[in-house]
Image: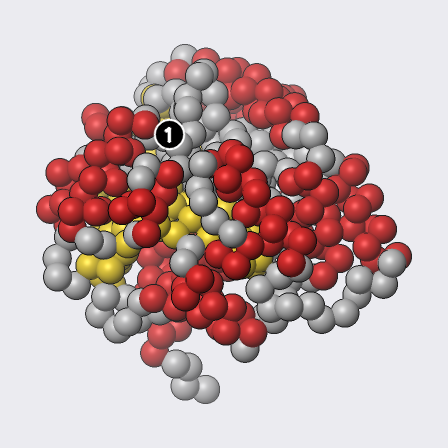
């Protein structure tokens, strides 16, 4: 069969592949310490599940509007006003099948063949692939540990060309855990406005921040940047709802209508009764979010201390999300060699940094229980002891 050329331009998700390999080893009875997954290990909070069950029992089992249940779109608009100081109405919001789907839809709606999209590396691995699927050209701006893995306003300005359409901004970030300060965000917003490009702000980890870090939505910094901002988020990380597939995108009415048309001809509405779970997530007290954040904070502390005590590797404290981005360059191994050897010899699953555009790093998720973290750190120590 001759596949479409666009398929040849993208590569399969390496994170999903490694997570699957670790799962398969577990099923064979091998005890794996799995730090590969980008999902909280907690169950979805009971009141969210109860609301979805109730909706199911009430017969909310039919097709709904492609852009989402009106009550959910309203609840998201309210959340964006209250939490993020973003002035969106329900008509500015579309409910999608996850943050990934939001971003994919966005690329399909705005990217023309040859349009350039600026992405700073290390990046969440799906960004460049989505741009390519939409016919665009990802323009990767490299950052490193020295600049705290943050793109500077100067780097952003220099990456802009007449073909630039969009800048992808992600704070808190996957895989680095970086959270940009309000001052840094303001400086980037100024470049976006001055160069008159669009920015998509992926804020999916906004609730998972530590040590007094502050989340600021770039679109809240004034009308000029607001007009150029598309805000993307979802329920997966904050509410431990990864399998529910629920996200949202907020922007101009014109954009949201276009995305709704794309959705109308591809996926239609998000699972109707699941959307009622999302309404409960937003409209109930947020204690569950804080409880999970605190658990992540404790795990982060333990993992960070253990990692930085192991000779040959190092890790800067991440201010957000639930990942450690560990520098492995001193080991002389590529990230793939490192992760493969670690999985084979010690049964510890991690993600090679090459997937995120940083081959001298690996990513460890600490969205897993403390026992696995301690055991995994013992094994990693043993793995590196044989080399240093
Ligand atoms: C930075 C970032 N954005 C978006 C997503 C998409 O999340 P979902 O599609 O599960 O809502 C993820 C998931 O790993 C992510 O890490």
Judge: label 1 CB < 8 Å from ligand 1: no
> Residue 244 vs residue 192: left or right?
right
Where's residue 235, x and y in %?
A: 59, 44
Which residue in the protein does label 1 denote?
179
Q: Can residue 342 be seen here?
A: no
| Residue 64 figure quarter | bottom right
- Residue 299 located left or right of residue 221: right
Question: Residue 273, percent across and down?
Answer: 75, 57
x and y percent of residue 77 in the render? 54, 47
Q: Quadrant of residue 79?
A: top right
**45 relative position to 339: left or right:** right
* Vertical placement of residue 113 versus 245, above or below: below
Q: Residue at x 39, y 73 (%)?
A: 7
Q: Check the image and report above or below for 359 versus 10.
A: above
Q: Residue furthest right?
A: 57
Q: Residues within 10 Å of mark 1 (few under 14, many from 20)?
A: many
């Amino acid at each position: 069969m001759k596949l479409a050329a666009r398929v040849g331009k993208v590569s399969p998700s390496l994170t999903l592949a490694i997570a699957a390999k670790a799962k398969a080893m577990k099923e064979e009875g091998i005890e794996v310490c799995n730090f590969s997954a980008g999902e909280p290990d907690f169950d979805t909070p009971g009141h969210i599940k109860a609301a979805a069950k109730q909706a199911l029992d009430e017969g909310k089992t039919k097709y709904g509007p492609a852009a989402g249940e009106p009550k959910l779109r309203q609840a998201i608009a309210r959340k964006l006003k209250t939490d993020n100081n973003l002035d969106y109405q329900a008509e500015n919001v579309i409910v999608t099948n996850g943050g990934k789907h939001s971003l994919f839809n966005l690329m399909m709606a705005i990217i023309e063949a040859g349009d350039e999209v600026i992405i700073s590396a290390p990046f969440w691995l799906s960004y460049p692939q989505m741009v390519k699927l939409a016919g665009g050209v990802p323009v990767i701006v490299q950052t490193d540990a020295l600049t705290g893995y943050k793109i500077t306003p100067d780097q952003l300005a220099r990456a802009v060309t007449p073909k630039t359409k969009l800048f992808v901004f992600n704070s808190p970030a996957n895989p680095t855990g970086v959270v940009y300060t309000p001052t840094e965000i303001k400086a980037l917003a100024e470049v976006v406005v001055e160069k008159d490009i669009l920015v998509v702000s992926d804020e999916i980890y906004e609730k998972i921040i530590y040590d007094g870090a502050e989340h600021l939505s770039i679109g809240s910094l004034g009308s000029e940047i607001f007009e150029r901002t598309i805000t993307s988020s979802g329920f997966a990380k904050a509410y431990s709802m990864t399998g529910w597939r629920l996200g949202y995108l907020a922007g101009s009415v014109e954009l949201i209508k276009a995305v709704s048309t794309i959705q109308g001809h591809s996926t239609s509405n998000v699972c109707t009764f699941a959307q009622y779970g999302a309404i409960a997530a937003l409209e109930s007290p947020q204690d569950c979010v804080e409880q999970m954040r605190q658990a992540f904070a404790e795990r982060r502390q333990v993992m960070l201390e253990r990692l930085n005590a192991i000779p040959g590797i190092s890790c800067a404290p991440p201010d957000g999300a639930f990942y450690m981005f560990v520098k492995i360059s001193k080991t002389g191994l590529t990230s793939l060699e490192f992760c493969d050897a670690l999985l084979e010899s010690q049964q510890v699953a991690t993600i090679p940094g090459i997937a995120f555009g940083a081959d001298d790093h690996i990513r460890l998720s600490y969205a897993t229980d403390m026992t696995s973290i301690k055991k995994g750190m013992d094994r990693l120590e043993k793995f590196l002891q044989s080399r240093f």
